[in-house]
Amino acid sequence: MPHHGRDTVTVSPPTFERSAFAQVDAGLPAGHAPMDRDWLMARFAEGLQIRLLKQPDTGLVIFQPGKLAWRPIEGADRALVVQDLRIAPDLVGRDGAARLWSVVEGFARYYGLAAVLALIGRGPGLIAPEVAPGRGWLTLDEGPGGVRLIGRILQGPLALPHLPRDWDARAKALGPGVVIQTTGECRALADRARRMLSGLSALRIPARHDCPADACALRRRAVRPDAVYSVIVDGQVIGGPEVTLDMILDRLGGAQSPS
């Protein structure tokens, strides 16, 4: 079938355990990796696709239908959204990334989708600029922190997808106190959120974990384009995984962390 790359391997629930996905995921550094197995298994039912480069090359791409994508992109119902794409450093200057982008585009064309979309930037949940695709892709929108929504339009007419415009309102809607918002796709970040909330609870500081249960809720509530891990204090986003307990306390007005 046209969407099957000759030099990639398809990972699915029946083949997940015997595939090299876990090793590749763990071996390719990213702020949102390694990814949570149970989260991925739940997403397969929503149309999630995983491809690995065939050995000896190392790389992966994860993509989903836009209407079920776990990234806050609006107007993506007729698109395919690339959630993650990583390759080994030795492939950056070669065609490793291009092969993976090509597989996604082939999949989208085969199923008659109108576009392929991705979020480019630094940090968890974003695709690094050095593996971004080249010719034929457009910057469709820009968001906080220099994040770019890029797209390859395959067929039209198509109202161009874009990022939300109401980031501030979304953060304010989460209410007072400290909120840590996560997608659940990375167990290490979910554990970090729980430790942070436990430390705040010990100080009797109001705090809660906001983890949307599905992609629709995530796209409606996400306070940042990357969405994977965000810290919100009294209705304002103060950062992502780099935010420490002391930083939160400073923002709240000088409370002291436990010794």
Image (cartoon, grey):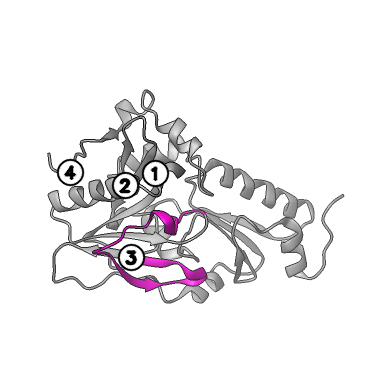
Q: Which segment did they paint magenta?
A: 124-150
Q: CA distance from mark 3 to mark 4?
A: 21 Å
Q: CA distance from mark 1 to mark 4?
A: 22 Å
User: Which residue is identified by label 4?
Assistant: 3
Q: Amino acid at mark 3?
A: Ile
User: Which residue is identified by label 3?
Assistant: 150
Q: Amino acid at mark 2?
A: Asp
Which quadrant of the structure image shows residue 128?
Answer: bottom left
User: Which residue is identified by label 1?
Assistant: 91
89 or 47: nearer the viewer: 89
Say which mark, if any, is on residue 161. Answer: none
User: Which residue is identified by label 2?
Assistant: 95
Q: Tell me whether the residue at label 2 lies in contact with that at label 1, contact meaning CB atoms closer than 8 angstroms.
A: yes
Q: Is residue 88 visible?
A: no
Q: Is residue 239 visible?
A: yes
Of the two numbered discs 1 and 3 in the rendering, the one whose residue sits closer to the viewer: 1
Percent x, y for residue 234?
Answer: 65, 70
Q: CA distance from mark 2 to mark 1?
A: 7 Å
| Helix, strand or loop at mark 4 | loop
Please identify the residue farthest to the front as the structure is shown.
Answer: 93
Task: Give the mark nearer the N terminus: 3 vs 2.
Answer: 2
